[in-house]
Image (spheres, rainbow, N blue to C red):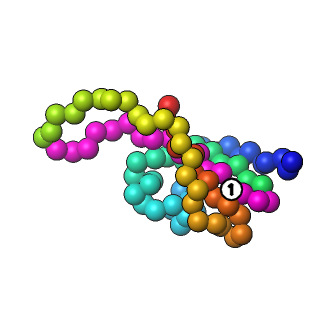
Amino acid sequence: MELKQFISLPKNFSMDLISLILPQEVLDDFTLIRFEESSEQVDLYLDELNFLPEGNGLYISKGFTPYSIVQDYPLRGRAVYLHTCTA
């Protein structure tokens, strides 16, 4: 079993590089909180933002969806997994 390298994001981390990997629609609704990498895979952990869409509708909170993992396209031969979570 290979050890994964956990990388915490520094406060001055630039999202420019991540915006080349993730579509803007994902970055509009989630923020990257950490990532892990190994020689076989990359794991990106995304936290769902808590905001209401603009409009005149009545919104009722039903909570966020549960934690999920989505496999994305490979990156330089490594599997990519997006972990969505809520605070």
Q: Is residue 6 left or right of residue 58?
A: right
**Secondary element at tag 1:** strand
Disc 1: CA contacts within 10 A as few (<14), some (14-19) or many (>=20)? many
In the drawing, does residue 4 fall left or right of residue 43? right
Q: Would you identify the image quadrant in which residue 26 lies?
A: bottom left
- Magenta highlight on residue 51: yes
User: Whole-percent x and y of residue 9?
Assistant: 64, 46
State the image coordinates of residue 50 (x, y, percent, origin top left). 38, 36
Up/down of 7 relative to 39, above or below: above
* Residue 43 spot, x, y in % from top left: 65, 51
**Image height of 74 relative to 62, above or below:** below
Name which residue lies at 58% across and 56% down.
71
Inspect the image, locate mark 1, and give the three-letter code of the amino acid beneath it: Val
Q: What residue sits right under mark 1 in the picture?
A: 42
Residue 9 visible in the displayed image = no
Camera-side residue of 7 and 43: 43
Q: Residue at x 15, y 39 (%)?
A: 57
Left or right for 63, reference 80? left
Q: Kindly give the residue lying farthest to the right in the view shown.
A: 1
| Span highlighted in magenta in the image | 39-55
Q: Please, is residue 39 above or below residue 85 in the view? A: below
